[in-house]
Image (spheres, helix red, strand yellow):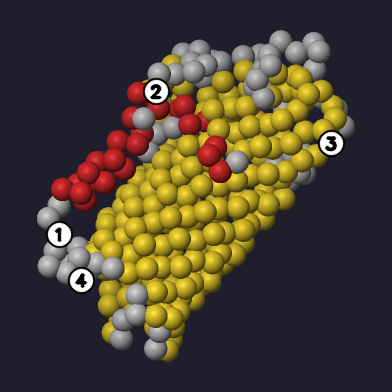
Amino acid sequence: MPYPVHRRRLGLAPFLLVVAWLALTPAQAQPTWRLRLSVQRGTPSGRIRVREFDRRGTPLKLSGDLGIDRLQTVDLSADRSLGDVAAIHLGINSMSLTGSAILAHPIEFNGTRIASGEISTVTGFPNFLRVDASYRHQLASFGHGAGLWGGIGVTYVMLNFKLHATVAADSRGHETKEDFLTQELPVPMLSLHFIYPLTTGLDLFADLDGGHLPWVNSLRKEGGEVRLTQTNTDARIGLSYRFAQRWNVAVFGYSRYFMQGERSSEDGNYFHLHDHGIGLGVMYLF
């Protein structure tokens, strides 16, 4: 069921407030910005189920049932230094799940009976977005540029899972997508960031982010109160090399877990995603 656009935007309020605060904050004498762009390629696993009233929904494995064997991510972030030991971080990434398979038997998805035969996932970059905002502070300094930072913030995920398939002739419904973002809320996040210089211009880095939202009222109504739970964890470890005065390049390995569940008298949905892979990024300082 569609919802007014203003409700969908409520969860973005913390992120937009931070952006506004940054724009209105007077610049330091020598402000430092770090812009990062990275691309990632991963191997996904997980599952999805979408119920609609008495249509329980068929549990589907992302890889085994839907043939989703790759996940691509484009990530853009900006950090602004607040003195020597603090910074504000803003980030947005877009993920693309693609795959195809042959269904051996009909399935149920969001109240729609999908016939056996070819099925493909068309959850492209515009349909799977995540925004982050956090404050980071140095927890420990080990000298020679090495240090440990901690962060606190929020993340907000916008997932619209889409399938392309043949609807069975006897199906009561005809929708082959599920708009998870309609029930989304900001999820509180904690993070740790470690950096250790190996040689001049070459650094080892590691990042760990995690957040959880227990079953809570999503403040939406669809067949009564809709309750939401969500978990996000991300880990990265890699090397960063400064090849010019203002430019760095990085290569890293990553692991990611995302879970979102929704339930009401009308809906009973969940989406689990595990993925791990490699990434390549570039950073510009100004």
**What's the distance in space between the residues labelled 1 and 3, CA to CA?**
57 Å
Name the secondary structure under disc 4.
loop
The residue labelled by disc 3 is 102
**What's the distance in space between the residues labelled 4 and 1, CA to CA?**
15 Å
Return the disc, 1 or 3, that comes first in the chain's sequence. 1
**What's the distance in space between the residues labelled 3 and 2, CA to CA?**
36 Å
Return the disc, 2 or 4, that comes first in the chain's sequence. 2
Q: Which image quadrant for residue 56?
A: top right
The residue labelled by disc 2 is 5
Name the secondary structure under disc 3.
strand
Return the disc, 4 or 3, that comes first in the chain's sequence. 4
Alpha-carbon neighbours of circle 1 within 10 Å: few (<14), some, or many (≥20)?
few
Q: Tell me the number on the disc at residue 27.
A: 1
**What's the distance in space between the residues labelled 2 and 4, CA to CA?**
40 Å
Q: Are marks 4 and 1 in contact (CB under 8 Å)?
A: no
Q: Tell me the number on the disc at residue 84.
A: 4
Q: Which image quadrant for residue 58?
A: top right
Instruction: Identify which amino acid the numbered label 1 is placed on.
Output: Ala
Alpha-carbon neighbours of circle 4 within 10 Å: few (<14), some, or many (≥20)?
few
